[in-house]
Image: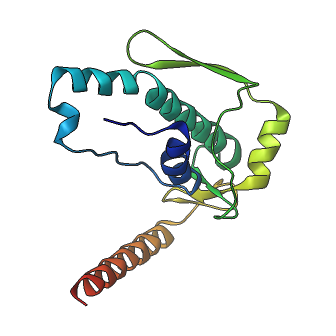
Amino acid sequence: MAFLSTKDLIHTIGESAALGAAGFVIWGDLNLTSSRHNCSRVKSFLGSRLGQYITNVTRAAEVCSDFLCQSNGRCVRQDPRAPHYLHLSANSYHIEPSGDGEFAVTGWHSQRELQLLANRFRCHCYQGYGGERCDSLEPPEETENAALRTANSAAFVVMLLILNFII
């Protein structure tokens, strides 16, 4: 049984976060839980590399959202193809297991690190907020129209996927 390497984590979870995804899904086959030994290995992976990486990306996304979007949006790469990720700087932050299966983050970002975020990422505002920094409240009718456009876009994508599957 093989687990994702750090490079694989960056190119899956890290890539998803940098492109503004609100979450991610990890799956595997029944082999992951087929024995006590395998379950222990999965738990160990969660308590080490995977858990630490998820903590790093989650905290970096929170820092970016707080700084760029006033906590009213998610950070998204300005250039979707650029190799920029939402990662805490090892020079400024330290991540340690806290003993309860969680990880504790200590440290604080530098002004240079915040400037890099501003240069590399932009805000994708949560529903009800707008503006470059998500610092404007949108009127309810604009919010409803945006939600309707999003629903229509999602329905169109699903239809294309179905057509692609049929053809």
Q: Is residue 104 left or right of residue 116?
A: left
Instruction: Give x and y (percent) for residue 15.
Output: 55, 52
Instruction: Give x and y (percent) for residue 83.
Output: 68, 54
Residue at the extreme bottom of the image, as rendered: 167
Instruction: Give x and y (percent) for residue 44.
Output: 36, 21
Q: Is residue 160 left or right of residue 67?
A: left
Q: Quadrant of residue 70?
A: top right
Instruction: Give the quadrant of the C terminus.
Output: bottom left
Q: Quadrant of residue 45?
A: top left
- Name the residue rendered at 45%, 51% in the picture: 22
Residue at the extreme top of the image, as rendered: 99
Can you say whether 2 is above or below 40 in the image?
A: below
- Name the residue rendered at 23%, 25% in the picture: 39
Q: How is the image coloured?
A: rainbow
Residue at the extreme right of the image, as rendered: 112
Can you say whether 128 is above or below 36 in the image?
A: below
Can you say whether 25 is above or below 137 in the image?
A: above
Instruction: Give the quadrant of the N terminus.
Output: top left
- Name the residue rendered at 23%, 26% in the picture: 38
Count of number-bearing discs? 0
- Name the residue rendered at 23%, 35% in the picture: 32
Residue at the extreme front of the image, as rendered: 1
Instruction: Give x and y (percent) for residue 114.
Output: 78, 40
